Image (cartoon, rainbow, N blue to C red):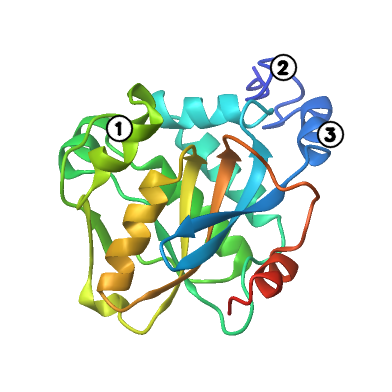
Amino acid sequence: MHAPCVCCGRYDHGREICPPCAEKIAVTPWGVSGLDCGDIRIPILWREAYGGPLTALVVQSKYHGLWSVARLLGRTLGSLPRPWLGSAPIAVAIPLSGSRLANRGYNQSLMIAQAAAAAWNIPVRRYWLQKIKQTSRQASLDRGQRQHNLLGSFRASRAIAGQRVILIDDIMTSGATLREAITAIRQANGTVIGAAVIARVGPMAPTRMHFSQHHAAHRLS
């Protein structure tokens, strides 16, 4: 028996995504938003607004052990224009704490990063960013609690010094996780030139824009 479409659950000749769902994803708007990180503003490439056709797949990949879905999400993200100007960066996924990784058995953000980076033809560095503090789940906290919850929770390897970095995660809500990761990388003398996520919660960019255009508009390189 053929496997069903991962989006709608219908059987369609064994295709991972049936044609109607593939078309829905293809026409879903993507864009770029800016994230204020102290003295800098980081462009965030997002594949859809939260609640779009890919959001349910993020939940499947995150909590139901569907590795193939995480890789599919990564390929979908990697189908967007390369999110940088100048020389190619390295990709770094937002890590899980050791205990959460042990319980879950995998990091869906790393799988997304690996597939997206393969599409963009850039390397992934798995151990250059670590989560060193167990934190409460961000989804269970209000906006004010999220930043405090993550303070000092990441540590970057000294190998990241002098490197240009694209951070990759599954969902961006308040941006607290990305801000803390960016802080850790900057403390290790790395440079985060942008980030990419599957779904973005909150206000969106008003128009679809190539990452390079947005990047230039904010004078980032």
Q: Residues within 10 Å of mark 1 (few under 14, many from 20)?
A: few
Cβ–Cβ below 8 Å for labels 2 and 1?
A: no
The residue mark sitting in front, 3 or 2, is 3
Residue 143's x, y, as percent?
40, 32
The residue under label 3 is 23
Q: Is residue 193 left or right of residue 177?
A: right
Question: Between 151 and 19, which is closer to the camera in this rendering?
Answer: 151
Residue 4's x, y, as percent?
65, 20
The residue under label 2 is 11
The three-letter amino acid code for the residue at tag 2 is Tyr
Q: Earlier in the sequence, mark 3 or mark 1?
A: 3
Q: Earlier in the sequence, mark 2 or mark 1?
A: 2
Q: Is residue 45 visible?
A: yes
**Which quadrant would residue 47 be assigned to in this image?**
top right
Residue 46's x, y, as percent?
63, 48
Q: Disc 2 to disc 1, how far (Cα)?
A: 43 Å
Residue at 58%, 38% (x, y): give it: 199
